[in-house]
Amino acid sequence: MTTDTSAPDQSPWNSRTFIARLMIALVQAAGLYLLIEAAAPPPAWPATVPTLFIPLLMIWSLIPLLALLGVGQLSRRPLLLWLLAATVVVAGLGWYAGWRLPELPAMDDNPHAPPAVIWNYGGLWLRLAIGLFIAHTLVVDAVTEGRWRPSYIRHFDTAWKQGVQAALTGVFVAVFWLTLHLGAGLFELLKITFFRRLIEHDWFALPATTLAMATAIHVTDVQPSLIRGARTLALTLFSWLLPLLVVIVVGFLGSLPFLSLAPLWNTHFSCGLLLATAALLIFLINCCYQDGAAERTTILAKRWAGSVGALALAPLVALAAWALGLRVGQYGWTPQRVDAAIITLGISAYAAGYVIAVLRAPHPSGPHWLRRLETTNHLTAHVALVLLLALLTPLADPARLMVVSQMARLRSGAVGPADLDVVALRFDGARWGRDALMALRQETDSRWSATQTDTLHANASTALIKGSRYQLEGALKHPVTAQDLASRIKVYPAGQSLPEDFLQTYSALKQRQGEGGCAIAGNGPCNAYLISVQTGGPVAVLMEDGYGTVPMFERDGQNAWHQTGTIRDLTWCDRVRDALQRGDATPVPPNRPDLLVAGVRLHIDPDDGACKGSKSVETRIMEPPPPDK
């Protein structure tokens, strides 16, 4: 028999708890609105101070959720003390997340180096949310029963109640917003756009969302029978998947002695797949065991499946650790591999405890089947909190460990200077990656040739001034020589050739843009069309290089090549392509004059479906925007 940890309220809509939850939701919405407004371009204080903005963002998005749950579970004083402790921890971890950001200086050749990105912290939020969920369950149960290790029945009830509440709240908020958007669509049928504009404003969307969450949490909190019924149904349903998964896992493990492990390692995702299988096995075993009451699992097949599955966890985790070790030995640590190592440690704790539970348990048909599983679940909850804290602090920071590993591989000769992953150092290494790149600009080693040293210095310098991973990856691709470039570009009309100075200009331009174009092997198609955009004027070059738009290049008064325009959405029907290949392109004046609006030149394009049988699109030569003043 389970213990009800909720406090039912016979009049939920008139209770002080409901009013308190609504006030918490409004305060949360106000705080998030101010933070979002501060982060909107151009950012204002406190968004300009990562060590302040990130803690505030994490506190305002997470602590009110704890308050929404706790206000119906704990009395005022314990709740305030728990919220204060959680706020201090979240603030400290948020400050560290802001401190580790790579504050790259503006370089001489790139005075507009982009500032550190401080908004993309979904991973941090998720890790903090998981940790707070576990800690909240432990705190609520410990305070309620007045001891460090409460009964397993209470742990089970509290944890699964909060899990079901979270799931139902997410569904409720999603359907709530679906209803709003459907309503906006209905009003738009009548040409009334006010409702659509209203729900798109942050000052409406944020309080609407937080109030919907508070309502969902309150309704599910004051209806314990609803939660218990949904939980029992879900766990009973999922428990029937346990025998199926155990048969699959046993078949997989049983086939390993007769087959080579090479196909498993060659998948490059074996560690993740094995860990996911082990995690699902743990989940289904707990769905079957539930709160340990004998009447929960009377079906012997599911009990046997739980015992066999608990024993199968150990080889699954061992294989995952083996696969991870092989990858680390080959390529060193990365943030993803550090995360996988932490998950492996956590699941290893479960595996060890579950094996002990099986070995110390009586026959699966006995009343105390897998009883020691309860101790394992309680202890591993604390282990999970320790591992999460390690991930979110310098102790096991994935970025720090990755940089240390990659720099050690460089200095040991395991990776050459030209092959060092400066992209990972720049965008995954946080402040340690920045410091490593700044040091690599002067790094020397007697084992390296002059060419290798120069390549390392150039790659490190390039990495420090690029604002996106895409730009850096494009800039690090080595361009082919002018002779190779000339041989890879097909020039039309046939028999013509491109000037060597144009090839050099085109290659340098694409490298600066981080694209490469035809200067990178494998890109294409690479076709050049020599045309004249003015009757009797100099020749211009249209470059079809596989990027959708076709840039046009012309010589200036100093005989230097420059990109002067772009043809967008070119209709590549056979007639147009054949004419361009013959050089049959005649300059004509525009059908409509251009419009100059607030300093912006607008082109009026006629609706011309010249290519029959193909999609009609607008084709135009766009003048590049004027240079910034």
Image: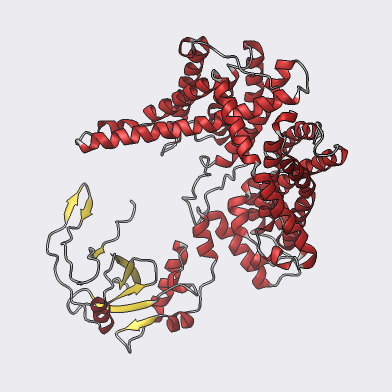
Residue 560 in sight in this render: no
Does 119 sit above or below residue 582?
above
Q: Nearer the viewer, residue 602 or 625?
A: 602
Place of residue 460 in the rendered image (x, y in percent of width and height, measured from the top left): 61, 59
- Between 233 and 419, the residue placed more toward the observer is 233
Q: Residue at x 28, y 71 (%)?
A: 557
- Residue plotted at (82% across, 34% down): 366
Q: How is the image coloured?
A: secondary structure
Q: Residue 275 at what x, y percent from top left?
A: 69, 50
User: Residue, x 75% and y 52% (percent of image)?
Assistant: 316
Q: Is residue 346 above or below residue 113?
A: above
- Give the left or right position of residue 413, taking residue 571 as reference: right
- Residue 111 vs 41, above or below: the answer is below
Quarter of the image for residue 71 reads: top right
The residue lying furthest to the right in this view is 360
Q: Give the number of marks.
A: 0
Instruction: Report if residue 443 is visible in the image.
Output: yes
How far across and down, in percent of the image, does residue 147 sit? 78, 18
In the figure, 512 relative to 357: above or below? Answer: below
Image quarter (top left, top right, bottom left or bottom right) of the N terminus: top right
**Left or right placement of residue 510 versus residue 60 in this view:** left
Observer-nearest of 381 and 8: 8
Tell me residue 336's x, y (percent). 65, 51
Image check: 490 left or right of 335?
left
Q: Relative to 489, is 64 on the left or the right?
A: right
Q: Quadrant of residue 202?
A: top left
Q: Residue furthest bottom?
A: 495
